[in-house]
Image (cartoon, rainbow, N blue to C red):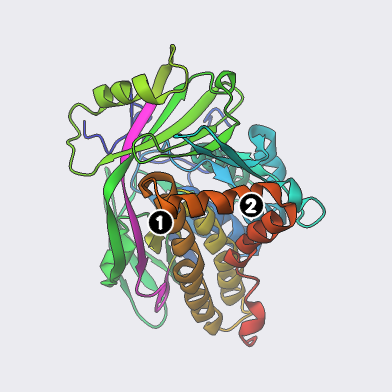
Amino acid sequence: MALDQVRGLGDAVRAAPRPVRPCRRTHSGTRVRQELPVSTPPVIVAGGGPVGLATAFGLARAGVPEVLVIDRDTSVGTSPRAMVYLFPVLEGFDRLGLLDDLKAEAVRGPGVTFLDHETGEHFPQLVDTLEGVVAHPYALHIGQDQVSEILLRRLADFPGVQVRYGTELSGLAQDDDGVSVHLRTTAGEETVRAGWLVGADGAHSTVRRSLGLGFEGFTWPDRFISTNLRYDFTAHGLPIASWRIDQVYGAVIALINDSGLWRFTFREAGDLPDEGLEQRIHEHYATALPGGGDYELVQFAPYRIHQRAATTFRAGRVLLAGDAAHLTNPIGALGLTTGFLDSFVLSEALAAVVTGRADETVLDAYAHARRQVFLDLVSPRATQTKRLVFDTPPGPAKEAALAHLRHLSSDPDARREDQLTMRAMATPSLLGSASGR
């Protein structure tokens, strides 16, 4: 099995294949209604991950009568990916009525602490400075697979939403009136017609490629190894969210849930083979885990990391969101954060177009605004943070960066101002930017 499928101690952890998964079901997976017939939905969402599901939820909640979500995987992915969500995302989930569901399963975090591995100095960047300034002055730690499961449960409230896993988009064609989407399943092939298509189908987006869109940017020469493990980091003085600065031992370390499961992400050379990765993880742990001691490696996965954006986020009746539209390295929790912020504004705008409350030009506004946010704010910030944590050698540049962190740690006003810059990553409602029909 290829290592791009997440492995837990060498074994695949994905659920056994199943051709169709209804969206209305209990948390345990018990079916509570039969699959809906495929009709002509106003919107098809390609991608049954968190961004696609959040988009479907936002559309349904805003009055779109039918939404079809498709995903070629047979179930929600469980690979160790995004897990921390900051106040702009929490505000969006609050507007959708989903925040309480997340809080019920998440660990509440106080912010992140930078650690200089060489000196042991801590630079806490706590978000208590946002008390009374933003509605949710904290972070939530919860795996993106759990977020997807919550969204699936809540989508069951909307009988017009159908979620079909094990359904691959193999091609598309569009005209002035809609999009024809060609689907492939184990039962055969079919073509489904819709008014609009949202491509939220990830970094290797079939939707984006079918449109012939460029994916401009670069790929980092190294790659990240994301691991989930059980180890008592707090016993060795680490807070529940840390970014450790070092060219060799740089790492992202964060508590995932109350069961004692932690995320530990480090980097290695991008040209190393997949073979032997598990052994290299254990070898890295031997010197990288603070204090040594026993641990349990639960899951791991290697990821190439990129800074890329599609040349446009709209092509006719097709729109892109999340990793299909843009990719960033995950340092700073800005990858899925940006995808959710896409979803919140896109679902509102597209629902208004579908229901006749806004002109299609609002979708051009979406495509422009979200691409500029990524290029001007998200990618530069994530790039700067990645270079600080993993790539900065000892010397004047590192000392200047640490001095800045030291200043933010000791000056609550400066820290608040820095943290509030994230608000600009959330695009306000665009409905005022298009005339009603």
* Quadrant holding the C terminus: bottom right
Residue 67 in the image, given as x and y percentages of width and height: 51, 59
Q: How far apart in space, not on screen, are marks 2 and 1 (Cα)?
A: 27 Å
**Contact, mark 2 vs mark 1 (Cβ under 8 Å):** no
Q: Main secondary structure of the magenta part?
A: strand
For the residue marked with disc 1, what is the amino acid? Thr
Q: Nearer the viewer, mark 2 or mark 1?
A: 2
Q: Residue at x 25, y 34 (%)?
A: 3
394 in relation to 13, above or below? below
Displayed quadrant of residue 44: bottom left
Residues 118 and 43: in front is 118
Residue 398 in the image, given as x and y percentages of width and height: 44, 50
Locate residue 16 relative to residue 292 in the image: left or right. Answer: left
Locate residue 178 relative to residue 216 in the image: left or right. Answer: right
**Label whose residue precedes the other's in the sequence (2 or 1):** 1
Residue 263 in the image, given as x and y percentages of width and height: 47, 32
Residue 235 sits inside the magenta stretch? no
The crowding category of the residue bearing disc 2, from other C-alpha atoms within 10 Å (few below 14, some 14 to 19, many at least 20), is some
Q: Residue furthest top?
A: 294
Q: Circle 2 — which element? A: helix
In the image, the segment drawn in magenta is 299-319
* Quadrant holding the N terminus: top left
Residue designated by label 2: 407
Q: Residue at x 40, y 56 (%)?
A: 328
Residue 94 in the image, given as x and y percentages of width and height: 71, 52
Which label sits on residue 328? 1
Q: Circle 1 — which element? A: loop
For the residue marked with disc 2, what is the amino acid? His
